[in-house]
Image (spheres, rainbow, N blue to C red):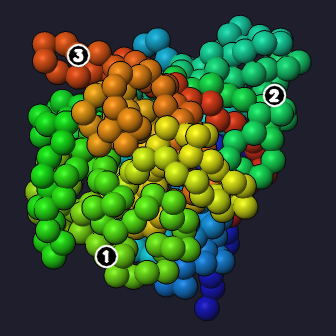
Amino acid sequence: MSHPAQIRIPATYMRGGTSKGVFFRLQDLPAPCQQPGAARDALFMRVIGSPDPYSAHIDGMGGATSSTSKCVILSPSSVPGHDVDYLYGQVSIDKPFVDWSGNCGNLSTAAGAFAIHAGLVAPERVPQDGVCTVRIWQANIQKTIIAHVPVSHGQVQETGDFELDGVTFPAAEIVLAFLEPSDEGDDGGAMFPTGNLVDQLDVPGIGTLPATMISAGIPTVFVNAADIGYSGTELREHINGDAAALQRFEAIRVAGALRMGLIKTAEEAATRQHTPKIAFVAPPRDYTASSGKAIAAGDVDLLVRALSMGKLHHAMMGTCAVAIGTAAAIPGTLVNLAAGGGARDAVRFGHPSGTLRVGAEAVQENGQWKVTKAIMSRSARILMEGWVLVPGDTF
């Protein structure tokens, strides 16, 4: 019996922020995978090693967490005024699907750097030394992201002394600006889909919870930690080993998705794991981060814990950080109230790995809130480049 040989596909393995993924140029993908559809999904699942009933990704490039089960495609931009189109696929770990419903804010950092590495930014726009402004069209959500990427000797500068909680080693700082990050593409509508800064969310089996539901960066459902029996200082091990707790969080997420109009039936949530996110907030208090670092109440404005793909995230998703910064800037949201209330243009929050500062410019127009820009600093680094191999019968 003959078996097909493996296929070699040019690829780059990159860390961006507190995530990492496999990056491709669209032109390097096999012809059947250059268009959206089953072939592309099958390729990405095989690259990552999903679905994996062992939840280990031993036979793929994934790391069996939501932060490491990611693939990215970049191509010359189809949108005027942009350098590249950036398309992101969140690969499910234990189920056979790829979720294209949202963006990865952390890998947006790597997208800016990879655009230069891969020759997708016009050479005349890349300085010999300085900062290259990469104009990214985020194709999943139809939004603009500006990445300010440091350049040294005509190449992306990757090493540096910028430290990011959740990443072990320092690197060069990349500043990201998410322009008008509310109103999420095909799921569009107001920043607050229900029209309210706080809703009473009915969750089957749990009861009624105050919730702020916002579409900024990524659709997110915020609830108070105290209302669900938590302090806001929890680490991954406090949540991810508790099957009953994870089921409760999923129930809240599904209820929020229905209320936000992201899905029509609860059953649809099973194939839309990436969005919305579910997060819980609390006022500042002392805690010890997963690294052992002491975080004092005075170091932060509030505490936030967020779940991604059904598990508590080890740090904070970049897109969820945009939602946090935006909601914090709007008086009366649960996020804003946890931070002490009042107007603000930036917030520093505590997450399981440490702290993160994000700025947001929010304005009210004709009675509707709008965020014009959210800004944060991350870093990115190439971990490996060459080819990724998949069996010839993958797609």
Give left or right: position of 240 versus 152. Answer: left
Task: Name the residue type under label 2.
Answer: Gln
Q: Residue at x 63, y 15 (%)?
A: 133
Q: Badge 3, how many Cα within 10 Å: few under 14, some, many 20+? A: few
Q: Residue at x 62, y 82 (%)?
A: 3
Q: Nearer the viewer, residue 112 or 6?
A: 112
Q: Nearer the viewer, residue 322 or 210?
A: 210
Which disc is residue 364 wearing?
Answer: 3
Residue furthest to the bottom in view is: 1
Q: Does dot 2 land on a helix, a strand or a loop?
A: loop
Quarter location, residue 263: bottom left
As drawn, 347 above or below 211: above
Give left or right: position of 125 versus 279. Answer: right
Separation of residues labelled 2 and 3 (CA atoms): 39 Å
Task: Name the residue type under label 1.
Answer: Gln
Residue 86 in the image, given as x and y percentages of width and height:
50, 35
Image depth: mark 2 or mark 1 in front: 1
Which residue in the protein does label 1 denote? 247
Residue 141 appears anywhere in the view: no
Which residue in the protein does label 2 denote? 157
Q: Are marks 1 and 3 in contact (CB under 8 Å)?
A: no
